Image (cartoon, helix red, strand yellow):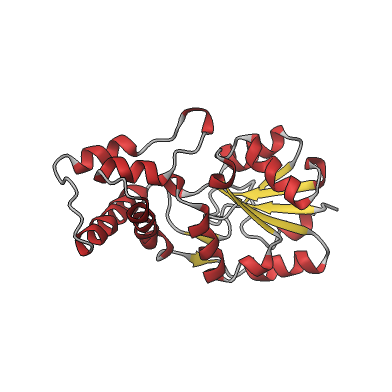
Amino acid sequence: MAKAVLLDLGNTLVSYYTREEFPGVLAECIGSCRQLLLERGVNAPEEGLWGRVKEQDHESPGHRVYPLEDRLGHIFGVRDEEILDALCAAFTEPIFGLAVLHDDVKPTLGELRRRGVKTAIVSNTPWGSPAGLWRRELDRLGLAPLVDEAVFCRDVGWRKPDPRVFTHALTLLGVEARDALFVGDDPRWDAEGPRALGMRAALVDRTGRNPDALRGLEGLLMLI
């Protein structure tokens, strides 16, 4: 039996948006930031705004995290740390508003705990948004008390599938890779990365398009 189960967050435990929907979501996030600056009386250059947004819509080479504060500072010409913190919160607000927690999540996490299996949420964050905001999101959704650890890419400085993200979570749990199972929705980030460390991996596809993937978390209990 697996000693630990590590789980992705977005589109595994909670649905926020699909890859195809992200451009529209990003526009809402930027709009939320613009509204915050307007309310605070902060002048930010409007000319070329969406060109700067497009320039920032990329990841750093080698899976290194590109922090949201740096992106927003470039887009809006802001350097004040307090304003940047507020901008990060404004940026993530539309994303959190889309959250749909799947019905099988809490029962499955509860059963894993009952069986003595350690658990951790291991997730990248949109545009390198701060881990603290996502920990608050776990609290809001009632997930934080149900897992032993939560590791976000900002905690480590590297994004999945970089092995450092997974090894950090395993170290916190005190479990070897061979004794753990990773569950996620993306073959690149959630299967190739863990398997390269010798960890088992399983994919969840709630759309049913991938016949080899679990349709939900109920099947997870059979794998451990």
Side of 149 relative to 81 (left or right): right
Q: Nearer the viewer, residue 189 or 62?
A: 62
Q: Quadrant of residue 95?
A: bottom left
Side of 18 relative to 73 (left or right): right
Question: Residue furthest toward the left?
Answer: 47
Q: Nearer the viewer, residue 131 or 200?
A: 131
The reply to whether residue 193 is visible in this rendering is yes
Could you tell me which residue is drawn at 48 percent across and 59 percent down?
133
Note whether 44 is above or below 188 in the view shown: below
Could you tell me which residue is drawn at 66 percent across and 60 percent down?
217
Image position, residue 17 (x, y; %)? 42, 55
Image position, residue 128 (x, y; %)? 46, 45
Image position, residue 115 (x, y; %)? 83, 65
The reply to whether residue 19 is visible in this rendering is no
Side of 210 relative to 41 (left or right): right
Quadrant of the rendering where the C terminus is positioned: bottom right
Note whether 51 is above or below 180 in the view shown: above
Note whether 1 is above or below 113 in the view shown: above
Image position, residue 84 (x, y; %)? 35, 52
